[in-house]
Amino acid sequence: MGIRSSVLGLAKVLVELMSVGFPASIKLSSIFGQLLRDAFGEIPYHVGSSIFQKDRRDVDVVVLLEDEDFEKMFGKREPEGPKWEAYCLAFSALGREVTGLNIDFKVQPREWANAKYPHTAEPRSAMTGFWRPT
């Protein structure tokens, strides 16, 4: 087996694991992921059932901010309120436009998210793609 076929095989496995299909997985990770990284300064994560299931209702994407940064941005340490909702709706709409997928975006404080959705029970797939340093 040559290097080319090994790389193609690995790519197929990775695309299959993301379960959003190709080229949507590239748009999700590279383009939308980079837009989120530029906006928030943190690596976004693909989370939820769409990581493993093809028959998904939506594709969940989350950015975890340090608690202090989240509080500065939204005025509290819990994900709620009109400003938070506006950010989530706006970036969900942007994600749908960029990827063609039904994106459900959330920005969450890191400690809150880790307590509510421990990554050992709720997998997170870093959307690093082909990012440029911020």
Image (tube, helix red, strand yellow):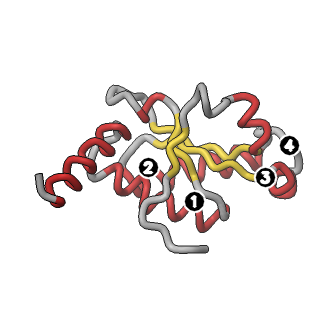
Q: Of the residues tagged 1 and 3, which is closer to the observer?
A: 3
Per the image, the residue denoted by label 2 is: 96
Q: Quadrant of the C terminus?
A: bottom right
Tell me the residue at 35%/49% (across/down): 25
Farthest residue, direction left: 1
Per the image, the residue denoted by label 1 is: 36
**Mark 4 surroundings within 10 Å by alpha-carbon count, few (fewer than 14), some (14 through 19), many (20 or more):** some
Per the image, the residue denoted by label 3 is: 66
Left or right relative to 6: residue 51 = right
Q: Nearer the viewer, residue 57 or 28?
A: 28
Q: Nearer the viewer, residue 89 or 112?
A: 112
Tell me the residue at 30%/44% (across/down): 15
Q: Residue 118: x, y in percent?
A: 67, 30
Residue 72 shows which numbered tag?
none
Q: Earlier in the sequence, mark 3 or mark 4?
A: 3
Residue 77 shows which numbered tag?
4
Name the residue type under label 2. Answer: Arg
Q: Earlier in the sequence, mark 1 or mark 2?
A: 1
Name the residue type under label 4. Answer: Arg
Residue contact at pointers 1 and 3, CB within 8 angstroms: no
**Mark 2 surroundings within 10 Å by alpha-carbon count, few (fewer than 14), some (14 through 19), many (20 or more):** some
- 6 shown above or below 56: below
